[in-house]
Amino acid sequence: MSSPMEVITPAVPSVGKITVIIKTIVAQRGFILAFSVIAAGFCSYLIYNFIYNVFFHPYAKYPGPFLAKFTDLYAGYHAWKGDIHLDMWRCHLKYGDKVRYAPNRLNVNTVTGLKNIYGQGKPFLKSKNYAAMVHQATNTLTVRDRKDHGRRRRVIQQGLSDATLRAFEPYMYEIINRFCDRLIQTSEEEAKLEKNGESTETAFKTSTWKTERNMSEWCNYLAFDLMATFIFSGKYNMLEREQYRYVMQCIEQSNIRVASILQAPILKAFRLDKLLFPRAIIARNMFLGFVGKLLRDTKKNDRTQRKDLFEMLSHAKDPESGKGFSREEIVAESVTLVVAGADTSATAMAAIFFYLSRNPDAYARAAAEVRSTFSSVDDIASGGGGGGKLNSCRYLRACIDEAMRMSPSVGQTLAREAPVGGAIVDGDFIPAGCDVGVPVYSIHHREDIYPDPFNYNPDRWMVQREGASQQVLDQYAAYNPFSVGPRSCMGKGVALVEMMATFAVVMFRLDFKMDASDKAGGKVGAEFGRHRANEFQLWDHITSAKEGPSLRFRPRALV
């Protein structure tokens, strides 16, 4: 022990320790230096990117939102918000027919642009952004290669033949009649009152209006059952059973993420989408799990009664290449078929119910046409989906077309990429690699093409094209709820048959009216574009989310 008088000398670090300390400091400074270099480089890139996109990009000359000039996040935000179709329309009102909606995307709101971009024989490719939608394998919706797309389309079209549709019709009408039964089925409380004899004398007469129905939900159930039966011969009975009703909710929730990264692929970098859209990821996994079950169940089903679409896809070959679908391609196509076959059709049918319930003159005229054309529900079915009697209901078809014009299931731009060498769109040169497209909702609401565009007017579709004015010709040319050209919806024919048959049966069997609780339209004072009470409101996430309309039904009194 040292004495109090001893001087305590501090320990002197060894040379080795000093070396370690120096190396640590150098290493830390090196890290800081490296980080500084990287940060400076990143900032330089952002500045360069900003200057190039704003001043030197081929699209720099076009007007548009300022943020959209240098970042995809502007479009991504509106895709997440669900008002991208409205924002595109607002931009065209403000900036004109040609709007720069993203650094590398031009929206063209003209009939000529629609023909130049999507028409037959045009050289445009699907935008690279569609790669964000690919899960494990590309499908008909996402594949970029034109030859590969043509092969897939030729295979699928074999399953959409008239023979396949005719074989499906008896099942289709059985499902539609079940749909009608459910719309007028009394609630549990009403059924209890009836059973106990506690109702008043007139409370539950045949003509009594039944319990309010949210038609977005019921159209989801109907469209799903039609899709599952037509494509997979599946009997999931969503109309009666709650077990699988979560699937349609999963599609809507999952599409919020997909729509956002489709517009802003940077959100997928570093897996940012998993942080930003955790609920959508869960919904996607639940949906894919159901598709897996759907495919397993399909293999177990009795395939002897009829050949469904899936059965045909499993064995069909492209007549040109002799190549069929691989297992991975069948799974990928099945996902698309479920969404396209159920979600988009459900949105269209909900819109039709909305506009007919809000426009009593159109409703009365369509109902009178159906009821004077057919003598019974069996008479509708015996005419066949492609039968002359159903097709003769021209005003009913006009009501359907007008609803899809006003509230298309897919209202945003389906972007295309200019090919090597570029291309001309509505008089302007589009350089190779640049995206361009026509927003569906915007062109459907051009006042010079559709006078009074926010007024539901089925009569605009009763005008014959032969000898018509240029405005009428443009009206038909601009109408594209199923898109147009070689990449248009292959299920258009099936969807139209289902909608015509559904509304013919509903209007023959039932009366319906808007419930006082309905909130499916716009609201006075809401943001511009959502302020019209007579417009069915959609939230565009590639396909559309919706709510309502709230309707009441009753059996039609047959006199």
Image (cartoon, rainbow, N blue to C red):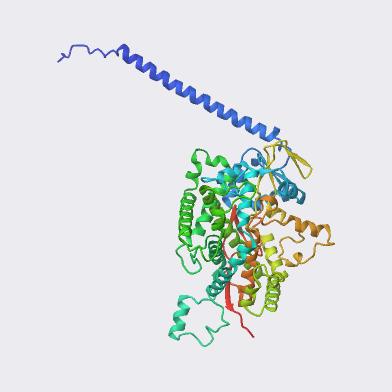
Choose between 386 and 130: the one closer to the eye.
386
Choose between 293 and 288: the one closer to the eye.
293
Q: Is residue 264 above or below residue 376?
A: above
Q: Is residue 546 above or below residue 198?
A: above
Choose between 317 and 534: the one closer to the eye.
317
Q: Residue at x 60, y 54 (%)?
A: 156
Choose between 547 and 395: the one closer to the eye.
395
Quadrant containing the N terminus is top left
Measuring from the top left, give residue 500's x and y in whole percent. 65, 68
Measuring from the top left, give residue 89's x and y in whole percent. 69, 52
Q: Is residue 232 above or below residue 284?
A: below
Quadrant containing the C terminus is bottom right
Measuring from the top left, give residue 314's x and y in whole percent. 54, 54
Q: Is residue 272 visible?
A: yes
Occupied quadrant, residue 168: bottom right
Disc count in the image?
A: 0
Q: Residue at x 68, y 71 (%)?
A: 390
Measuring from the top left, give residue 99's x and y in whole percent. 71, 45
Q: Is residue 521 visible?
A: no
Q: Indicate left or right for 450 with 510 as reference.
A: right
Q: Indicate left or right for 190 with 58 as reference.
A: left
Q: Indicate left or right for 158 with 464 as reference.
A: left
